[in-house]
Image (cartoon, rainbow, N blue to C red):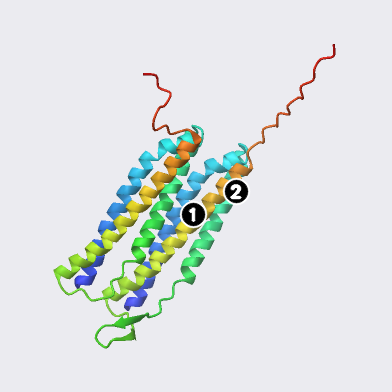
Amino acid sequence: MNYNVITYCLYLLITLFVVVYVGNMLFRNGCPFLLNTFGGNVQLADAINRILLAGYYLINIGYAVIVLKVWKQVASLQEMLDVLGNKAGTIILGLGIIHMFNVVVLAAIGRKKGYLILTNKNQQP
Amino acid sequence: MNYIVSAYSLYLAIAVALTIWVARTLHTNSKVLLVEIFHGENELAVSVNKLLQVGFYLISIGCAIIRLEIRPNWQFDEVTRTNMLQEINSVQSTIEVLSYKLGSFILILGLMLFVNFFLLLMLRSGSKPRTPRVIQQPLVRPAL
């Protein structure tokens, strides 16, 4: 059990926790949007939401597991923290960017279809 | 029992478990879509779902078994400054090799799931009953 193995275990724990947490949040909060898109069919929206969640888990965890490898030998606690910060930070940053992109695209679609009204121009004072 | 054999058994166990989980998730949830595609014919939807599920299992597990073999990688050695064959003789190198194998297999599974899903969505939008087009009557002035 050297430092590399401990780093791998910690890295997997952190990334799995973040991916599962973000996925759950998206699952809960994406439901109303899907309901709107599929015309209020609750069963259908729920099924599609679950398939999307599974796909999200597979893609993200697959990528996180692929980039697990650290080429150099980790010799001390400080190096371990360096490597961990670098790797986990990259994954979390990537998740954040993908998430913001998704939100922007969904907002654009919603505005185009008239689901999302950001400012009510017709409101009478 | 050396490290490669244990890596093989771990890889196979995780891959098969993941395949079963993904197939179950996909096919319990795609039943709703299939019923809609076949216009409410429940029996037909269930049997098509079963066929799709068997196909998914065969392709995924076949892919996992074909990609089973682990070959030693070329790795840059910092001491001798050359590329050396990485030997798989410790827990660390086993994890490194296994992570690449498993990660790429998980990505393939995700791809399969999305291909299946988009296929179903396309079929659904294709099978919608067409609304009859309303032909506008030309305005004809009534004869006086």
Determine the secondary structure under disc 1. Answer: helix
| Res A12 visible | no
Which is more toward the observer, B83 or B43?
Answer: B83
Q: Nearer the viewer, mark 1 or mark 2?
A: 1
Q: Amino acid at mark 2?
A: Val
Position of B79 with respect to B69 (left or right) is: left
Give the crowd class for mark 1: few <14, some 14-19, many >=20 residues within 10 Å.
Answer: many
Determine the secondary structure under disc 2. Answer: helix
- The tag on residue B113 is 1
Which is more toward the observer, B32 or A72?
Answer: A72
Position of A49 with respect to A68 (left or right) is: right
Which image quarter holds the C terminus of chain A? top left
Disc 1 from disc 2: Cα separation? 16 Å
Quick check: B93 above or below A59? Answer: below
Quarter location, residue A33: top left
What residue sits 26% from the left and 66% below the top?
Answer: A8
Give the crowd class for mark 2: few <14, some 14-19, many >=20 residues within 10 Å.
Answer: some
Q: Which residue is mark 2?
A: B48
Quick check: A98 above or below B66? Answer: above
Q: Report the chain holding disc 2.
A: B
Coordinates of residue B64 in the picture (x, y in percent): 46, 67
Nearer-N-terminus badge (1/2): 2
Coordinates of residue A56 in the picture (x, y in percent): 40, 52
Mark 1 and mark 2 in contact? Answer it, CB < 8 Å: no
Position of A14 with respect to A64 (left or right) is: left
Q: Report the chain holding disc 1.
A: B
Q: Amino acid at mark 1?
A: Leu
